[in-house]
Image (cartoon, grey):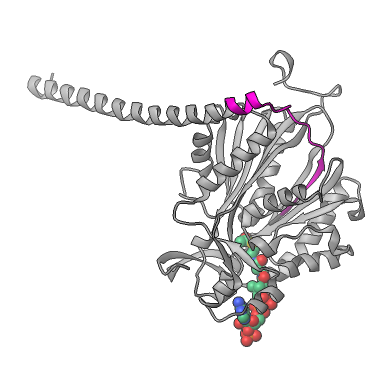
Amino acid sequence: MGVNGSRPRGFNGTRYAHIIGWGVDVPEHVMTNHDIEKLVETSDQWIRERTGIHERRIAGDRDNVVTMGVRAARRAIQRAGILSHEIDLVIVATSSPLHLFPATACLIQDRIGASDAGAFDVLAACTGFIYALGLASAQIKAGMIDTALVIGTETLSRLVDWSDRSTCILFGDGAGAFVLKASDQPGGVQDVIMHADGSGADHLYVGSGIRPTWDGEQTEQRIDMNGREVFRFASRVMSAATEEITQRAGLHVEDVDLIIPHQANVRIIQAAARGLKLPMDRFFVNIEKYGNTSTASIPLAVVEALESGRVGPGDRLVLVGFGSGLTWGAALVEWEVEQTPGSVMREAMQEAYYIFAYVRSFLRRLFRIVETVVFKSHRVKDNTRKRRRGPDN
Ligand code: ACO
C-alpha cells in the first residue's frame, strides 16, 4: 500500500510490477547420466550430445512440491524484505501437483503464513511460470493487488517412466519463486504473451499404466512424449514468441540483453538462436545441471543468471517457454530492482512470523476438530430429543 493506505500510482496513474525478490530450492540428490546408464540402455555421451544435460536433481522421500516451493518462497520473501502477510496473491505453476485439489498454492500459502492472500495453481505445463507471471503482473498493474508470490515447483521424477529412455533422461526436480510488487517507477514485468494449441495435446501428456520408478517402486502415471514433434514445435515457437514480444514493445531482438529460455534441450535453444540470428551468448543456459525442471526451469535460470552477474540493473530480458498443451509464451522484463530496504529486525520478525503461521495453522485445525465434536454431540442430543418426542413433534 502507498501513503495513507492508497495504492502506489505514478503521476500519470501508471503502475508497474517489479520483481523484488527471488529464491530457488533444489533437492540434494544428484543423478548423473552415468546413474541413468544403469537404468536404461543409454550413454552419458548420447545424453550430453543430444540434450546438453549432464545431471539432474531428484527429490527424496521427505521432499515434494510443497516443501521445495516453501523453501524457494521463503528465500524470495527474505530477498524482497517483505513480511509474508503483505502478500495478496500466491500463484503456483506446477505440472506435478501434490493433489489435483487442494491447490499446491493453498498448502504453500498456509505454511508461509500469507494469511491475507488468495491462492491458486496454474496448469500450463512448462509454460506455467510464464502464465503465472502474466496473471500476477496483470493483477498488480490493474491495481487489484500490490504484492504477489509466483512459484514454479516440480517433482517430475515421480511422473517419469524410468524404463523409457526417451523421457527419463530429460527431467529433474526443483523450485523457484519470485516476489512481485507494485511500483510507480518504470520497469519490471512489462509484457507477457500466452499461447496454446490443444490440437497438439497428444504429443506430450501424463498417461496411466504401472511403471517402475527410479528407486524400484511402482507408479501409476507416466509421461508420454513424441520427442521429435515436441522438438520441432519448440524450436519454432521459442524464436516466434521472442520476436512477437519484442515487436509488441517496438523493439528488435538485438535490443534484448539476455534471453532466458525454458531449459528443455540445449539443441532447442540453439535452434531458437539460429532462428533469431543471435549468437548463443545472448541465451542463458544451465540445463547441464538440472535437466528439464518444467515450471521451475525459468526461475532457476534467472536466479543463476543474477547470481553469476549475467543480469544487472537496467538489463532487458526475455523469458520464453513452451510445454505440453501445447502451450508457449514469453515475458519482457526490465530488470530494475526496487526494493523495500530489508533489515535484521524485519528478517527476525518474518522468522517469528513463520513460527506464528505454523501455530496458527495448527490451532485452526484443532479448532475445526473441536467444532466438529461439539457440533456432532449437539446433533446427537437433538436427534435423541426428537426421537423421545416422536416424529410429529
Ligand atoms: N539413449 C540412446 N539412444 C536413444 C535415447 C537415449 N536416451 N533416446 C532415444 N534414443 C534413440 C532412439 O531410439 C532413436 O533410435 P533409432 O534411430 O534406432 O530409432 C535415436 O536415438 C534417435 O531418436 P530421436 O527421438 O530422433 O532423438 P532426438 O535427437 O530427437 O532426441 C529427445 C530425443 C532428446 C527426446 C528430443 O527429441 C527432445 O529433446 N525433444 C523435446 C522434448 C522436450 O523438450 N520435452 C519437454 C517439453 S516441456 C513439458 O511440458 C514437460
Q: In the image, residue 266 lies at what x, y percent?
A: 73, 67
Q: Is residue 4 left or right of residue 248?
A: left
Q: Residue at x 77, y 64 (%)?
A: 269
Point out the stretch of residues depicted in magenta.
Answer: 329-349
Q: Residue at x 31, y 30 (%)?
A: 369
Q: In the image, residue 385 lies at what x, y percent?
A: 12, 20
Q: Residue 339: within the magenta?
A: yes
Q: Is residue 273 left or right of residue 118?
A: right
**Image quadrant of residue 345?**
top right
For the question of whether residue 200 can be seen, the reply is: no
Q: Residue 5: within the magenta?
A: no
**Image quarter (top left, top right, bottom left or bottom right) of the C terminus:** top left
**Image quarter (top left, top right, bottom left or bottom right) of the N terminus:** top right
**Image quadrant of residue 274?**
bottom right
Q: Is residue 25 left or right of residue 336?
A: left
Q: In the image, residue 235 lies at what x, y percent?
A: 76, 67
Most distant residue in the top direction: 4
Most distant residue in the bottom direction: 41
Q: Residue at x 91, y 51 (%)?
A: 255
Q: Quadrant of ligand 1?
A: bottom right
Residue 237 versus residue 369: which sits nearer the camera? 369
Q: How many marks?
A: 0
For the question of whether residue 232 can be seen, the reply is: yes
Q: Residue at x 40, y 28 (%)?
A: 364
Q: Is residue 131 left or right of residue 12?
A: left
Q: In the image, residue 100 lies at what x, y percent?
A: 47, 49
Is 316 located above or below residue 327 in the figure?
above
